[in-house]
Image (cartoon, rainbow, N blue to C red):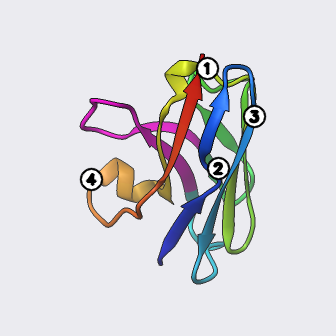
Amino acid sequence: VQLQASGGGLVQTGGSLRLSCTADENISNINVMGWYRLLPGQRERELVAVMTERGSTNYAASAKGRFTITRGDKSVHLQMTRLKSEDTAVYFCNDDRVWRLGRGSWGQGTQVTVSS
């Protein structure tokens, strides 16, 4: 499945953004879909939020209470509020197995820059 992330941009501290990830085919049969981010200077993507096909969610500690993940048949979204400068990163969505197993492809991601 090909995934395209969008919705990033430049926002001030405390602002909000809604990221979208569009799939080229139905992803409802993928058990866990997630959002991940690559922080500046880091080599590994970190988990931001995941959601199972049944609607269960899990968030990184840094995202709890501020970010909300949702998903549809061909999309995954990440609503981000109260953004902080440390949220500046390139954000990606993917099948969680790709992240966990370290195998598979990643799309280009979408850049989020939070200015203070």
- Disc 3 + disc 4, Cβ < 8 Å: no
Amino acid type of the residue that numbered disc 4 sits on in the rendered structure: Gly
Name the quarter where the C terminus is drawn. Answer: top right
Q: Which residues are magenta?
A: 33-49
Kind of residue at badge 3: Ser
CA neighbours of label 4 inside 10 A, class few (<14), some (14 to 19), many (20+):
few
**SS class of the residue under badge 2?**
strand
Q: Which is nearer the eye, 29 or 10?
A: 10
Image position of 53 with respect to 46: above or below:
below
> Label 2, label 1: how many angstroms apart (C-alpha)?
23 Å
How far apart, in angstroms, are the residues tagged by discs 2 and 4?
Answer: 19 Å
Query: Is residue 59 inside the magenta stretch?
Result: no
Mark 2 or mark 4, which has the lower sequence index?
A: 2
In front of the other: label 3 or label 2? 3
Whether tag 2 and tag 1 are in contact, CB under 8 A, the answer is no
Residue under numbered circle 1: 84
Q: Nearer the viewer, residue 112 or 105?
A: 112
C-alpha separation, residue under disc 3 versus residue under disc 2: 20 Å
Query: Type of residue at label 1?
Result: Lys
Looking at the image, is mark 3 or mark 4 nearer the viewer? 3
Residue receiving disc 4: 102
Q: Against 93, is 75 above or below?
A: below
Element under disc 4: loop
- Residue position for label 3: 16
Q: Position of residue 30 (x, y in %)?
A: 56, 68
Of callouts 3 and 2, which one flags the residue occurring earlier in the amino acid sequence? Answer: 3
Task: Tell me which residue sits at (66%, 33%) in the image.
Answer: 11
Of badges 2 and 1, nearer the viewer stands: 1
**SS class, disc 1:** loop
- Residue 87 in the image: state x and y as whole percent: 54, 27
Would you name the residue on which mark 2 appears?
Answer: 51
Give percent across and percent down for residue 70: 74, 52
